[in-house]
C-alpha cells in the first residue's frame, strides 16, 4: 500500500474556515488520502465536500485537552457519528492518568466506545505529557477498553510523536491495538520511518506535502 492510504490529513486549528476545510478535502481527493481529520463541528461540511468519494472523515472528541466530563465526550462523539464521521479520535483524561485514577481513564474510553458502536476509535495519549511508565499504563488501559488505535499526540502540546515512543507502544500493544503517529510529522522520509517502526496511520497537517513527495520519489 502506498503512503497516501496511511494518511489522516489534518486541520484542527480553531481559526480554520469553511474555505480551509474545502482546501483540506480537495487535497485529500487529489492525493487519495485515507481520511481528513477535523474538529467535530466540521464533520457535516467535510462529508459534503467528500461526497461520492471513499475518503473517511475522522472527528476529534474532547480535543485538545481531554479534560472535560465523560458525558460531554460521549455527547460529542455521538453527534459526530450521527453527522457522518467514519472514525473518532478522542483525547484521554490525561489528569486522571497522572492521578493514577485508572478506572476513570478506562471508563472514559469505554463510554465513548459504547456510544459510537462499530465506528473505529482512536485514543490520543498526548505522550509529551507522560512518563514512560504512564505511556505503558495508558496502552494497557487502551487494550482493556478495546480501543482500535492508540494515537500519540494532538499536535497542540509541546511536542508530538517520537520514534522511541512508537517502538515502546508497539512493544506493549503488539497487534492488539493499531498505532497512529501524529504531531510534527512534516515530510515523506519521516512518515516512512514511523511506518517502519510500527505506525499504521500518520496524522499530519502536511498530508498533501508528504503524498506529493512520495510521488516524486516513486517517479525518480
Ligand atoms: O492529529 C494530528 C495532529 O494535529 C497533527 O499535528 P501536526 O499539525 O503537527 O501535523
Image: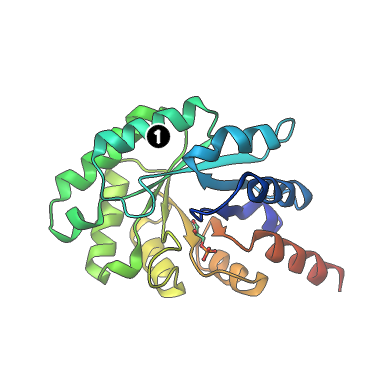
102 vs 78: above or below: below
Is residue 104 found left or right of 174 in the rendered image? Answer: left
- Between 163 and 207, which is closer to the camera in this rendering? 207
- Between 20 and 139, which is closer to the camera in this rendering? 20
Q: Kindly identify the residue that appears in the image at 63 percent across and 44 percent down.
A: 18
Question: In this view of the protein, can residue 118 be seen by the observer?
Answer: no
Name of the residue lying farthest toward the right: 219
- Between 68 and 211, which is closer to the camera in this rendering? 68
39 vs 219: above or below: above
What SS does tag 1 mark?
helix
Q: Kindly identify the residue that appears in the image at 34 percent across and 30 percent down.
A: 75
Name the image quarter holding residue 71: top left
Name the residue carrying label 1. 77
Other-residue count near label 1 (Cα within 10 Å), few / some / many at <14 / 14–19 / ≥20 = many
Q: Kindly identify the residue that appears in the image at 51 percent across and 53 percent down.
A: 12
Q: Position of residue 82 (x, y in %)?
A: 48, 25
Name of the residue lying farthest toward the top: 82
- Disc 1 CB within 8 Å of nearest ligand 1 atom: no
Amino acid at each position: 500500500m502506498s503512503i497516501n492510504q496511511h494518511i489522516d490529513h489534518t486541520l484542527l486549528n480553531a481559526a480554520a474556515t469553511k474555505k480551509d476545510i474545502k482546501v483540506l478535502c480537495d487535497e485529500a481527493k487529489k492525493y487519495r488520502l485515507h481520511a481528513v481529520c477535523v474538529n467535530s463541528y466540521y464533520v457535516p461540511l467535510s462529508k459534503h465536500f467528500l461526497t461520492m468519494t471513499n475518503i473517511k472523515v475522522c472527528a476529534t472528541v474532547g480535543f485538545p485537552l481531554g479534560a472535560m466530563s465523560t458525558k460531554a465526550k460521549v455527547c460529542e462523539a455521538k453527534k459526530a457519528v450521527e453527522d457522518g464521521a467514519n472514525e473518532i479520535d478522542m483525547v484521554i483524561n490525561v489528569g486522571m492518568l497522572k492521578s493514577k485514577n485508572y478506572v476513570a481513564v478506562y471508563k472514559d474510553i469505554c463510554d465513548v466506545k459504547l456510544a459510537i458502536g462499530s465506528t473505529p476509535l482512536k485514543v490520543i495519549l498526548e505522550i509529551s505529557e507522560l512518563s514512560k511508565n504512564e505511556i505503558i499504563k495508558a496502552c494497557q488501559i487502551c487494550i482493556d477498553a478495546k480501543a482500535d488505535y492508540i494515537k500519540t499526540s494532538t499536535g497542540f502540546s509541546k511536542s508530538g510523536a517520537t520514534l522511541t515512543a512508537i517502538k515502546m507502544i508497539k512493544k506493549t500493544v503488539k497487534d492488539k491495538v493499531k498505532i497512529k503517529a501524529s504531531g510534527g510529522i512534516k515530510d515523506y522520509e519521516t512518515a516512512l520511518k514511523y511506518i517502519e517502526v510500527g505506525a499504521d496511520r500518520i496524522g499530519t497537517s502536511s498530508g498533501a506535502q508528504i503524498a506529493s513527495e512520495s510521488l516524486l520519489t516513486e517517479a525518480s
